[in-house]
Image (tube, helix red, strand yellow):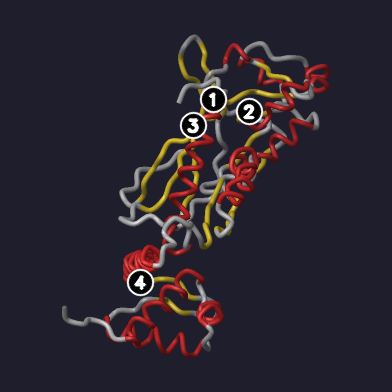
Amino acid sequence: MKRHFDDIQLGSIELFCLAAEAGSFTAAALTAGVTPAAVSRSISRLEERLGARMFVRTTRSIRLTESGRVYFEQCSQALTQLVEAERQVSGQQLKPSGTLRMSIPTTYGHHRILPLLPEFRRRYPDVTVDINLSNRNIDFVAEGYDMAIRVRTQPDSTLIARKLEDGALVMIATPDYLQRAGTPQTLDDLAHHECIQYELPSNGRRIPWLFQENGQPRELLAESGYCCSDDVLGGVTLARNGAGLFQAYRFSVEKELREGSLVEVLADYAGRSRPFTLLYPSNRHVPLRLRAFIDYLMECREGWLRHSPVAP
């Protein structure tokens, strides 16, 4: 087999991937134990060899070009496969390790994923977990994430999507608020209530509430003196403190509903949900740490579905 790379070229590829993951030559240099100037020179040699720019450089930051993104996606897969090959040869293939980077919506993170992580790390102590709690869409390649969980995912041939569950929606308020403002009996009654809204960070649009009326789906966007953005749990906190009505995921308020500090209203119009989906790059090789977490998550998912009022 003819050699295509020498040691310097392989080193340049590794430094390129480190810089792409970190978004910084300086951070890549710290990880590799070299100087930022060495990283810059190495990547310049790589760009000269390929005849393409890998990064757009400014005085404060770097970002991948489209060519750089494609090259990074392929090279990171290849380097991961090399690491896994060494682990298999050295007998470490059954021991997940490394950093698992995940992006999770705030509500789903607090009520579903974060409670699972201590047990996961007890099983796999060599895996460290880097969690981004955010409702924004992420770039897997440019930002270096292994997986994400999202609602309302768009078709993307570069990602594998696995359905986790349908998050049942419930209208909530405090007994104190209902005593002051009255309990709505129909959807038309919402016009006379404080209806706490949530605004999507991606486009600034308010999310309509979802109902079933006479067996048909209905959406409603009521007016209110309150609107939260970025963190859906802000709406739950407002409702919990008597600000008004809010439509929340049932799993996020189950405890309060059982205790009576929150009350379900408009139950006759309930039955709608939103799907939560696990996403990860459709690489031919899935890192062992990610495979271990997916298996663990699917195991926990069975318990959620057994107690869910909405069928998956």
Per the image, the residue denoted by label 4 is: 68
**Dot 2, how many residues are within 10 Å of its Cα: few (below 14), some (14-19), or many (20+)?**
many
Task: Give the mark nearer the N terminus: 2 vs 3.
Answer: 3
Per the image, the residue denoted by label 1 is: 210
State the quadrant of the N terminus: bottom left
| Secondary structure of the residue carrying numbered label 1 | strand
Spatial separation of the CA atoms under disc 4 and disc 1 = 42 Å
Residue at point 35%, 69% (across, down): 82
Residue 94 seen = yes
Spatial separation of the CA atoms under disc 3 and disc 1 = 17 Å
| Secondary structure of the residue carrying numbered label 2 | strand
At label 1, the amino acid type is: Leu
Q: Position of residue 12 (x, y in %)?
A: 38, 82
Residue at point 36%, 78% (across, down): 13
Task: Give the mark nearer the N terminus: 2 vs 4.
Answer: 4
Q: Are marks 1 and 2 in contact (CB under 8 Å)?
A: yes
Using the image, determine if residue 65 lies above or below residue 33: above
Spatial separation of the CA atoms under disc 4 and disc 3 = 35 Å
| Secondary structure of the residue carrying numbered label 3 | strand
Quadrant assignment, res 286: bottom left
Residue at point 52%, 57% (across, down): 100
At label 3, the amino acid type is: Glu
Per the image, the residue denoted by label 3 is: 165
Q: Is label 4 or label 3 in front?
A: 3
**Dot 3, how many residues are within 10 Å of its Cα: few (below 14), some (14-19), or many (20+)?**
many
Query: As drawn, is 253 to the left or to the right of 14?
Result: right
Q: Are marks 4 and 3 in contact (CB under 8 Å)?
A: no
Q: Is label 3 or label 1 in front?
A: 3
